[in-house]
Image (cartoon, grey):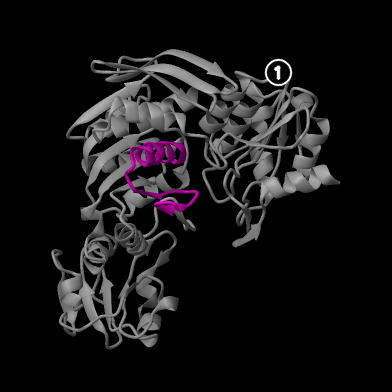
């Protein structure tokens, strides 16, 4: 492939060299450059790729795509307005536009994305359609699992995954779409058959600065979607709708196009009547809690928008058995229950605790912390959400990154002020879990919040293996 073919369809200028040279592959990391590669100099997220052009050329790059005229050290220099957006279109060209050959479903929102994508995939699987999945837990090519490098990967990896899915015979791709991916143009050039909005609560404000900017980033998905499926009970759905050409709403509390009525909650899951147009279908899903009804409605809405039958929706939802790290019950052989959940926002904490309230026979004991190098404003709010619904809180460390974990805990504790007899701060997460299990009694639920599917602790730039399932097992064996 020539450089000109790689950049076809986009505006750019050739500042030096020639666009008619042959290229090997695309790279954004100067350390991974090989002979004949194209280096895209990206800006943002703490580093400026323009500072690594010399390194990339020394490693073998024959061309550089940049946002300004600069020294290209003998390589062809392409200048464009936005190198991230150019990367997305170039990646599609490089892999032969595999995404255009499949039907894409994108799910965005603060909470629920992972569960909703799995619900949609399960319904498609039941129908007999081969579907790929791209998300926080993993990437699935049909039933083959690939490790996940993030909720929505960089454009070049994203289009490689699309290529693998298409070659494997996938007809559909169900994706979690993060606000970062939308703000950083990783999905530019894609057209989604369906875009889904779950909800918007405080998160990632260290990057987006305020809720309005966070919402605007999320709303980009709906300008890229043929049909939008929006949560009418979330006030931010109005922002999402601004970009939508055709939209359906779903909800419980407000009038919506797709409604859940006659809802029943139990420790075994939820049941409700799904109403959409002339359809009134009894639905059941084996994940407890009100948030599960919202997740089910989002998944059902997406599949209905794809044209699937009521019978397919009902049978597919029945097969959903939960997602790793989302309201996951860990078998412990004790008279109390242990659950792991990814809840890492005030709203996420509140949702999972309300779900447990619906079936717990005695107390709720929660172990939680807050991530370092992230939105600090939510830390006391996490504490308030936890103490407001749990009977006892153990405040601990959770991915402190480059921050002092004790300092993070000190910023959580004001949210628990006045309830000193109902919480304990233990910095070491293993010791915090050990303490929570030691005080658990018959009928209690011990909730480990924040880690979810993660099997590591992020400390000073190093991801150290840490699987709470293994930790629980070791504690109970000793």
Q: Position of residue 397 (x, y in %)?
A: 68, 46
Can residue 427 be spotted in the picture?
A: no
Q: Which residue is mark 1?
A: 361
Residue at image position (21%, 54%) is: 100
Locate the N terminus by quadrant: bottom left
Q: Is residue 184 above or below residue 3?
A: above
- Res 303 quadrant in image: top left
* Residue at 29%, 80% in the rendered image: 24
For residue 198, what is the image quadrant?
Answer: top left
Q: Residues within 10 Å of mark 1 (few under 14, many from 20)?
A: few
Is residue 140 shown in magenta?
Answer: yes
Instruction: Name which residue lies at 29% across and 25% down.
Output: 249
183 sits to left or right of 449: left
Q: Is residue 437 left or right of residue 275?
A: right
Q: Position of residue 98 (x, y in %)?
A: 25, 59
SS at circle 1: loop
Answer with the quarter of the image where residue 77 lies: bottom left
The residues colored magenta run 114-143
**47 in magenta:** no
Relative to the observer, which residue lies in front, 387 or 443?
443
Q: Residue at x 52, y 28 (%)?
A: 286
Is 130 rendered above or below residue 289?
below
Q: Residue furthest front?
A: 128
């Amino acid at each position: 492939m020539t450089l000109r073919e790689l950049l076809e369809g986009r505006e750019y200028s050739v500042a030096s060299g020639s666009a008619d040279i042959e290229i090997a592959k695309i790279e954004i990391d100067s350390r991974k450059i090989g002979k004949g590669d194209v280096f895209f100099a990206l800006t943002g997220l703490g580093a400026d790729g323009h500072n690594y052009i010399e390194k990339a050329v020394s490693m073998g790059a024959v061309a550089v795509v940049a946002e300004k005229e600069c020294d290209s050290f003998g390589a062809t220099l392409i200048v464009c307005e936005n190198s991230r957006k150019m990367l997305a279109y170039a990646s599609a060209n490089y892999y032969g536009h595999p995404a255009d050959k499949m039907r894409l479903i994108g799910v965005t929102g603060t909470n629920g994305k992972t569960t909703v994508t799995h619900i949609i995939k399960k319904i498609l699987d039941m129908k007999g359609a081969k579907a790929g999945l791209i998300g926080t837990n993993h990437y699935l090519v049909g039933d083959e699992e690939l490790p996940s490098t993030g909720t929505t990967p960089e454009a070049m990896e994203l289009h490689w995954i699309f290529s693998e899915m298409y070659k494997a015979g996938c007809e559909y791709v169900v994706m979690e779409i993060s606000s970062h991916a939308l703000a950083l143009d990783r999905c530019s050039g894609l057209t989604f058959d369906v875009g889904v909005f779950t909800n918007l609560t405080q998160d990632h404000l260290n990057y987006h600065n305020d809720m309005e900017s966070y919402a605007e980033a999320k709303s980009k998905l709906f300008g890229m979607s043929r049909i939008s499926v929006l949560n009418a009970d979330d006030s931010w759905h109005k922002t999402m709708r601004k970009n939508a050409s055709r939209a359906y709403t779903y909800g419980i509390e407000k009038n919506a196009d797709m409604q859940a009525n006659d809802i029943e909650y139990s420790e075994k899951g939820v049941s409700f009547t799904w109403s959409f147009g002339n359809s009134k279908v009894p639905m059941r899903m084996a994940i407890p809690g009100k948030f599960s009804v919202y997740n089910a409605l989002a998944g059902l809405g997406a599949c209905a928008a794809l044209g699937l039958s009521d019978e397919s929706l009902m049978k597919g939802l029945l097969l959903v058995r939960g997602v790793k790290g989302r309201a996951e019950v860990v078998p412990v052989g004790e008279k109390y229950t242990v659950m792991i959940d990814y809840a890492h926002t005030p709203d996420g904490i509140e949702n999972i605790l309300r779900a447990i309230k619906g079936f717990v026979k005695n107390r709720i004991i929660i172990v939680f912390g807050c991530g370092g190098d992230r939105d600090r404003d939510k830390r006391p709010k996490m504490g308030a959400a936890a103490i407001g619904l749990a009977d006892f809180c153990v405040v601990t460390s959770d991915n402190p990154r480059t921050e002092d974990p004790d300092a993070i805990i000190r910023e959580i504790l004001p949210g628990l002020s006045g309830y000193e007899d109902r919480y304990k701060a233990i910095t070491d997460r293993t010791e915090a879990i050990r303490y929570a299990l030691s005080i658990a009694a018959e009928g209690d639920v011990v909730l480990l919040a924040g880690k979810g599917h993660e099997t590591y602790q992020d400390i000073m730039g190093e991801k150290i293996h840490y699987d709470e399932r293994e930790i629980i097992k070791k504690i109970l064996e000793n």
